[in-house]
């Protein structure tokens, strides 16, 4: 599968590396060259520095042949625009955008995008743990391993 990950912060680097390790062709785009330091040394996907809101950068990344795109920049607005353009203009079949500010989630939903909101998901999980005794709590360690943290 050809995947484009836009944003190479902690989440983007983790997604890109996990997909690369599973054998996918991964292209990571970020406007800051230093962001690629978040990728492990053995990452062999393509990295591109550039303004993701320009068609030239998206075309050089191979968006016309991408099967999936993850927009995980720090900007909800940029993620929404990228998700919409990927889906509507370039017909990328699987698009996921990250939402930082839960108050802006309606923006993503108005465009019918698949959304991941770490703030909302994290808050919900913390509330669950605090308000009910969970039978099993798990956490992710390293690059995808699941570790049992607590059992009641």
Image (tube, rainbow, N blue to C red):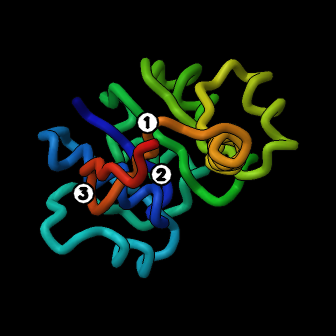
Q: Position of residue 55 (x, y in %)?
A: 53, 44
Is residue 40 shown above or below 16? below
Label at residue 127: none
Q: Nearer the viewer, residue 46 or 140?
A: 140
In the picture, measured across the screen, residue 9 lies left or right of residue 133, that is left
According to the picture, the residue beneath numbered tag 1 turns out to be: 69
Residue pictured at 48% horizontal, 66% vertical: 9
Question: Quadrant of residue 59 in the image?
Answer: top left
In the picture, measured across the screen, residue 104 lies left or right of residue 50, that is right
Residue pictured at 75% horizontal, 47% vertical: 77
Q: Position of residue 47 (x, y in %)?
A: 30, 62
Q: Nearer the viewer, residue 33 or 124?
A: 124
Q: Nearer the viewer, residue 104 or 33?
A: 104
In the picture, measured across the screen, residue 89 lies left or right of residue 27, that is right
Observer-side mark, 1 or 3, equals 1
Q: Position of residue 24 (x, y in %)?
A: 18, 38
Could you tell me how far apart the alpha carbons at marks 1 and 2 are, in whole angstroms?
8 Å
Q: Secondary structure at mark 2?
A: strand
Could you tell me how far apart the alpha carbons at marks 1 and 3 are, in whole angstroms?
14 Å
According to the picture, the residue beneath numbered tag 3 turns out to be: 46
Residue 79 in sight here: no
Label at residue 6: 2
Residue pictured at 68% horizontal, 44% vertical: 99
Residue pictured at 36% horizontal, 57% vertical: 14
């Amino acid at each position: 599968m050809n995947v484009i990950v836009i944003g190479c912060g902690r989440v983007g680097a983790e997604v890109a590396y996990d997909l690369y390790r599973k054998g996918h062709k991964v292209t990571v785009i970020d406007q800051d060259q230093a962001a690629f330091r978040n990728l492990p040394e053995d990452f062999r996907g393509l990295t591109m520095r550039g303004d993701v809101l320009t068609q030239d950068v998206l075309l050089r990344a191979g968006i016309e042949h991408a099967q999936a795109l993850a927009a995980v920049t720090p900007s909800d607005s940029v993620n929404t625009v990228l998700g919409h353009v990927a889906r509507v203009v370039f017909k990328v079949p699987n698009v996921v955008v990250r939402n930082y500010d839960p108050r802006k989630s309606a923006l993503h939903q108005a465009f019918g995008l698949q959304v991941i909101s770490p703030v909302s998901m994290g808050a919900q999980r913390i509330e669950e743990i605090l308000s009910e005794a969970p039978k099993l709590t798990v956490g992710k360690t390293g690059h995808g391993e699941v570790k049992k943290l607590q059992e009641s």
